């Protein structure tokens, strides 16, 4: 970009990472961005910052408990479930990382 070389980390390769085919697809996408004059590395940083600013599953669950209209007994029951089961298991994940199956 602008006569300078940038390094873009695509992801971890191997058993617990991405496949070579996925890495190649991401490389092609990054090259397209560079051809358009957009820094792929900066776009990745922006996307990561946006995801972090959205909050964690735990923060959103507590906000839902505080803002939802329900009776006190229902709120207490749901808070107990959230505190006992959901926050320890999923509390630090972003909302995009949590699926319905994870919650079930």
Image (cartoon, grey):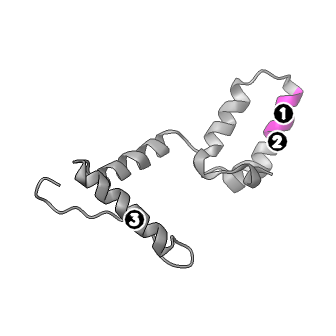
- For image coordinates 17% across by 63% down, the residue present is 5
Dominant SS of magenta comes to helix
Where residue 79 appears, as percent x and y from the top left, is 79, 38
Residue topped by disc 2: 80
Q: Local crowd at mark 1 within 10 Å, few (<14), some, or many (≥20)?
A: few
Q: Which mark is residue 7?
A: none
Q: From mark 3 to mark 1, how far is it between C-alphas?
A: 44 Å
- 45 sits to left or right of 50: left
- 78 sits to left or right of 36: right
Where residue 91 appears, as percent x and y from the top left, is 65, 49
Q: Of helix, strand and loop, which one carries label 2?
A: helix
**What segment is highlighted magenta in the picture?**
73-79
Where residue 44 appears, as percent x and y from the top left, is 37, 52
Q: Local crowd at mark 2 within 10 Å, few (<14), some, or many (≥20)?
A: few
Q: Nearer the viewer, residue 55 or 96?
A: 96
Front: mark 3 or 1? 3
Residue topped by disc 1: 76
Q: Earlier in the sequence, mark 3 or mark 1?
A: 3
- 40 sits to left or right of 25: left
Q: From mark 1 to mark 2, how far is it between C-alphas?
A: 6 Å
Q: From mark 3 to mark 2, how far is it between C-alphas?
A: 40 Å
Front: mark 3 or 2? 3
Residue topped by disc 3: 10
- For image coordinates 82% across by 37% down, the residue present is 78
Q: Are marks 1 and 2 in contact (CB under 8 Å)?
A: yes
- 91 sits to left or right of 10: right
Q: Earlier in the sequence, mark 3 or mark 2?
A: 3
- Within the magenta stretch, is there residue 74? yes
């Amino acid at each position: 970009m602008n006569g300078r070389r940038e390094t873009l980390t695509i992801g971890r390769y191997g058993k617990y990472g991405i496949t070579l085919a996925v890495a190649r697809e991401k490389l092609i996408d990054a090259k397209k961005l560079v051809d358009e004059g957009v820094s792929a590395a900066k776009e990745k940083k922006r996307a990561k910052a946006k995801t972090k600013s959205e909050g964690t599953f735990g923060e959103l669950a507590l906000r839902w408990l505080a803002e939802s209209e329900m009776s006190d007994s229902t709120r207490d029951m749901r808070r107990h479930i959230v505190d006992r089961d959901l926050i320890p298991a999923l509390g630090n994940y972003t909302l995009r990382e949590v699926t319905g199956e994870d919650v079930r």
